[in-house]
Image (cartoon, helix red, strand yellow):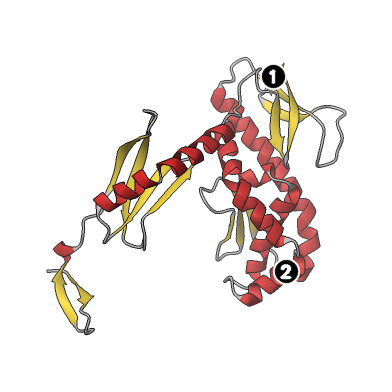
């Protein structure tokens, strides 16, 4: 029979049956606020968790329960933090108000600003900058060309393509400044939607960046790029690593604080716009 060890106070191992391990839990429970509104909460028992934790993201509400905590204690924790939960949901729903609606959406976020948007029929569905607009990274309007058969999915796909092209243009401007100070260039740069991270470096040298970064002010976006490039020198977050970041991007703390305050809203915006 499978077994595991637990430790007595005198540090002597005791053989226990694997059946004694609390079964894994993953269910959805309703939580009702004082005003009668209800929200679904994903309740997950995580053996790696050290304490009960409540979190809110664009994916919903999650209650993480350590292996040794009782469900009664978890439910009590949820009830005690109902006010905080209501406030976080209110902020999240406010951030999600922006959405892509054919002919109705009047502006789209890009690089920390809202650019005016004009809708027009087109042979193909694509989002472009206004003809005659400035070539600078900031400013200028947008025009959404929409074919007669385009549905919501086609609009969202065109918007994702536009955002990725803009993000690649930003990285293309910034990379030449940093490459001479690195031991090697990244193998490639890819963009995708990330639930919690802003970037990562794969063992093969591929840098992955969250697509929602293109919605942030450029200094915040560039900081994440520099953060990941410095992992080509140090793969950890040691003091030596942070010295490399500091040498290249002295204002990194300010950008880190910006993400702590606005990061969740940024991800929610992209999710609401692109589905």
Depth check: give the residue in front, 127 or 73.
Answer: 73
Q: Position of residue 31 (x, y in %)?
A: 34, 37
Residue 275 falls left or right of residue 19: right
Q: Is residue 90 above or below residue 218?
A: above
Q: Residue at x 34, y 50 (%)?
A: 77
What is the secondary structure assignment of the residue under circle 2?
helix
Q: Disc number at residue 246?
A: 2
Marks counted in the figure total 2
Q: Disc number at residue 123?
A: 1
Q: Position of residue 274 (x, y in %)?
A: 57, 33
Depth check: give the residue in front, 78 or 58.
Answer: 78
Depth check: give the residue in front, 244 or 62.
Answer: 62
Quadrant assignment, res 8: bottom left
Q: Is residue 274 above or below residue 137?
A: above
Please state which of the two labelled residues, at mark 2 or mark 1, is closer to the viewer: 2
Give whichever of discs 2 and 1 has the lower sequence position.
Answer: 1
What is the secondary structure assignment of the residue under circle 1?
loop
Separation of residues labelled 2 and 1 (CA atoms):
49 Å
Q: Position of residue 29 (x, y in %)?
A: 30, 39
Q: Is residue 257 visible?
A: yes
Q: Is residue 226 above or below residue 9?
A: above
Which residue is at the far left?
Answer: 1
């Amino acid at each position: 029979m499978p077994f595991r060890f637990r430790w007595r106070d005198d540090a002597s191992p005791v053989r226990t049956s694997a059946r004694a391990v609390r079964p894994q839990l993953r269910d959805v429970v309703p939580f009702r606020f004082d005003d009668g509104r209800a929200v679904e909460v994903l309740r997950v028992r995580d053996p790696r968790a050290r304490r009960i934790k409540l979190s809110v993201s664009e994916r919903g509400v999650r209650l993480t329960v350590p292996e040794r905590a009782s469900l009664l204690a978890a439910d009590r924790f949820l009830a005690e933090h109902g006010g905080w939960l209501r406030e976080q949901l209110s902020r999240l729903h406010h951030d999600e108000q922006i959405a892509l609606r054919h002919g109705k959406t009047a502006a789209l976020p890009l690089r920390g600003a809202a650019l005016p948007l004009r809708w027009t029929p087109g042979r193909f569905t694509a989002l472009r900058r206004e003809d005659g607009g400035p070539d600078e990274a900031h400013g200028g309007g947008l025009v959404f060309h929409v074919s007669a058969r385009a549905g919501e999915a086609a609009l969202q796909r065109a918007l994702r393509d536009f955002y990725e092209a803009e993000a690649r243009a930003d990285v293309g401007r910034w990379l030449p400044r940093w490459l001479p100070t690195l031991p090697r260039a990244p193998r490639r740069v890819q963009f995708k939607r990330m639930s919690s991270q802003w970037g990562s470096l794969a063992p093969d040298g591929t840098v992955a960046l969250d697509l929602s970064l293109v919605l942030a002010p450029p200094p915040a976006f560039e900081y994440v790029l520099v953060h990941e490039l410095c992992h080509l020198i140090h793969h950890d977050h040691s003091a030596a690593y942070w010295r490399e970041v500091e040498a290249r991007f002295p204002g990194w703390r300010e950008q880190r604080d910006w993400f702590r305050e606005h990061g969740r809203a940024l991800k929610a915006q992209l999710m609401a716009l692109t589905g």
